[in-house]
Amino acid sequence: MVDNLKTVFRLYRRYAVMDLLWLLRDTRYFFIQVLSDGISGGCTVAGVYLLSLNFDHFAGMKQSEILFMMGYALFVDGIFNLFFIGNNSGFISRIVGRGQLDHLIIQPVPLWAELLAQGFSPFSGSPLFLFGTGLAIYGAIKAGIIINAVWLSIFLFYGICSCLLIMSFLYIISCMAFYAPAAAEEISMVGRDLFSTLKTYPLGSMNPVVKRLFLTVLPIGLSAWFPSLLLLKAGTEGITALAFLPSLYLPGVTLVFMLTVLLLFKKGMKHYERYGSPRYTGFGFR
Amino acid sequence: MNQNKNVLTGYGSLLKAIRSTMSICAKQIFDGGFLFVAGGYMIQAVQFVMLIFIWKSLKQGEELMTYTLMATILHQELNIISPATASLWEGSVIGRFLRPIPVEVSFFAETVGKWWIPHFLFFGLPLWLLAPAFGISPLPASAMHGLLALISLILAASLGFALDLIFASFAMHLKNGCFAALAIREAIFALLSGEMIPFSLFPKAVGRLFSLMPLGSIAHGPLTIYTGLANNPLWVLGLQLFWNLVLWTVAILFFRKSKERMISFGG
């Protein structure tokens, strides 16, 4: 296990170098990417923030709290971009659907290590991460949060959990690509869009049944709104104000989703080992 | 010889060629099975449910529900993304120049066949019929509003195609950067078109400003007329007409200039 972890870190270094070389080779494209991330992030934030300006309490949240939640949402997207945007690592249905899984299997490292490392893009993937971090800190200050080491640790921990939850959700739906490669090739993009467009909405005053749906099987509320509420409470009233069970809810659901991924992905891999990708037919593969 | 002529001219007329292209594309979208389009429908359904419950909690009137319902049903007609840009990075654009119809018309026919028809039949129409069961009125504010909204929708779709052509021409110069440019386009459209969040929920000055911009004429225009939220529907139509004239002039010039590069690059 220690050897595998060392391998992962070595791979991270390699992918970081490759990302830097790509940046140096194609600087124009890098700046287009930075601009794209900035505008996309800005537009995502602007819509809901402008909406909140018209109401004193939008779905139970003040404007400064909404701003913090926007920052948190972008921070989570930033983590995703930083670690999983490269080589379609976060969009596994594309790899499976296009018959490219073999490219990973033949690498002299475990599949999980390659999947974990090949998306690492510390240079091209960092703009949204920096933007989100900046906005979250600004929002936290505006919302009256007392920022200290403990709060920052919880912020980072929840951010990672939210990102892993989104990843797990994408991997779960991507398992369909093992059985229907052509039809499900883009399903992970669809899942990502679901989170990108909807996670910035606060669910405070929503119908309880619908809210429960968005906090369980379709965990959109857990990717920004729910952890933001906990972080706001912890930041303004102190860590002790957090109730035990709600504070463990996000990590718990993330764990359940990750275990489901393990189960379904293993099942899918067994199917793949037996039948291969139907893309290796007369149609060819990309 | 006569048969060759028929084949090469798209079975003899432009309209038939358009119809054939639409028909082929409408069938082609299901080549990968229903799952290929079901994911997109699922997102829209979830988005619709979420927005409806948020608007309900804001207690801003029934018109907002109808607005979001129609925005969801007409999503493909309002947010036009033709195969123009995708064909550049797929390298298939060159093939379209060999077809017996103008390349711009081909993009239009493909969009209608591939996106409008299946979306309307398998998602839009069932949602429109089911809406009353959720307590949402699917009908326009009045028959006159419905008629004006239809005219506005045609103008909005025309504006959408003009913007799409401008964007494709722009993407031609970006080469690999067109992926990033597409992300910018989608983000800007989501904010400035009013498709997702009606401008009436924004601060007044911001909403007014957005409604005057070209993207505001695409979704905000027809939807406010349909729901009766537009104070002066004729002003909205006039504004749409104005933006159509401006953007189509730019689109034709820009696309003509980019064509040469497009052909030599080949995608």
Image (cartoon, grey):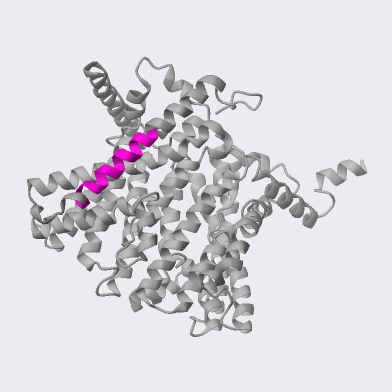
**Relative to residue B82, is residue A229 drawn left or right?**
left
Magenta stretch: residue A36 in it? no
Which residue appears at 43% of the width and 32% of the height? A264
A130 vs B262, nearest the viewer? A130
In the rendered image, the vertical position of residue B168 relative to residue B162, given as above or below: above
Tell me the quarter of the picture where residue A15 sits.
Answer: top left
Is residue A128 among the parts visible in the rendering?
Answer: no
The percent position of residue A262, horizontal first and vertical second, equals: 38, 31
Which residue appears at 50% of the width and 76% of the height? B224
Which residue appears at 58% of the width and 66% of the height? B130
Q: Residue furthest right?
A: B2
* Majority secondary structure in the magenta region: helix
The magenta segment is: A246-261
In the rendered image, the vertical position of residue B51 relative to residue B115, given as above or below: below
The percent position of residue A73, horizontal first and vertical second, equals: 29, 52
In the rendered image, the vertical position of residue B88 relative to residue B62, given as above or below: above
Tell me the quarter of the picture where residue B91 sits.
Answer: top right
The percent position of residue A170, horizontal first and vertical second, equals: 41, 41
Q: Quadrant of the C terminus of chain A?
A: top right
Q: Quadrant of the N terminus of chain A?
A: top left
In the rendered image, the vertical position of residue B146 relative to residue B103, given as above or below: below
The percent position of residue B216, horizontal first and vertical second, equals: 47, 69
